[in-house]
């Protein structure tokens, strides 16, 4: 009986869809790929990269769709490899946001912001995620240092 019902359903689907044109897929919006601004590259050189002959820090940037309230995130993948995920929906904010995320990478490289055994630490103390986002000390520092660096870069270039 089950086989008869399955065959009947398949037959009905073939009748319903027969003769209907195959939908043409909509062209997908292709945003401009992220490109580092010279100020980003200068910050990486000045503030993140260790002196030679130490192993250089590698930062990968992936454009993706994140939660609409999230502009970007920074992740430490290994001692020398970091990932910045930047939200395609917030392209106008990328310039400042990239500086903000680079400050987070600097915080991680210096172990000011540190993830150990699934626990985040800020300057050696467990991070308090109950603090509202704009008041978290690592976020305050990232915003302030990012803006200071941008201001300094713009005055000297």
Image: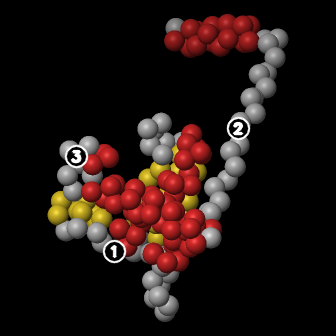
Q: Secondary structure at mark 3?
A: loop
Res. 74 image quadrant: bottom left
Q: How is the image coloured?
A: secondary structure
In this view, the residue in front, 74 or 93, is 93
Q: Is residue 109 left or right of residue 127?
A: right
Q: Earlier in the sequence, mark 1 or mark 3?
A: 1
Q: Are marks 3 and 2 in contact (CB under 8 Å)?
A: no
Count up the numbered dots: 3
Image position of 20 with respect to 144: above or below: above
The local crowd at label 2, few if under 14, some if 14 to 19, many if 20 or more residues have their Cα within 10 Å, is few
Residue placed at 56% from the left, 67% from the top? 155
Residue 8 spot, x, y in % from top left: 63, 7
- Callout 1: few (<14), some (14-19), or many (20+) C-alpha neighbours within 10 Å? few
Alpha carbons under labels 1 and 3: distance apart: 23 Å
Is 120 in front, or is 26? Answer: 120
Residue that appears at 18% across and 59% down:
126
Q: Secondary structure at mark 2?
A: loop
- Residue 49: percent from the left, percent from the top? 48, 79
Disc 1 target residue: 110
Q: Which residue is mark 3?
A: 131
- Left or right: where 126 falls relative to 141: left
Mark whose residue sits in front, 1 or 2? 1
Specify the label residue 29 is tagged with.
2
The answer to whether mark 1 and mark 2 are in CB contact below 8 A is no
Q: Residue furthest front?
A: 155
User: Gap in Å between the C-alphas at discs 3 and 2?
Assistant: 37 Å
Q: Taking 120 as reference, is 23 left or right?
A: right
Q: Residue 87: tell me if it is visible.
A: yes
Q: Residue at x 35, y 68 (%)?
A: 107
Point out the image quarter for the C terminus: bottom right
| Picture coordinates of residue 4, whole percent (x, y) | 58, 9
Q: Establish if 125 lies above or below 51.
A: above
């Amino acid at each position: 009986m089950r086989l008869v019902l399955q065959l009947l359903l398949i037959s009905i689907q073939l009748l319903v869809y027969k003769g209907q044109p195959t939908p043409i897929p909509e062209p997908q919006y292709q945003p401009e790929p992220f490109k580092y601004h010279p100020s980003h590259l200068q910050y990486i050189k000045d503030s993140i990269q260790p002196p030679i002959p130490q192993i250089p820090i590698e930062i990968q940037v992936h454009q993706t769709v994140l939660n609409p309230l999230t502009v970007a995130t920074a992740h430490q993948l290994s001692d020398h490899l970091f990932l910045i995920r930047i939200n395609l929906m917030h392209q106008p904010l990328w310039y400042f946001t990239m500086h903000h995320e680079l400050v987070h990478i600097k915080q991680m490289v210096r172990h000011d912001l540190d993830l150990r055994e699934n626990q985040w630490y800020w300057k050696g103390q467990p991070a308090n995620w109950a603090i509202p986002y704009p008041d978290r000390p690592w976020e305050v520092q990232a915003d302030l240092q990012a803006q200071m660096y941008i201001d300094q870069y713009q005055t000297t270039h």
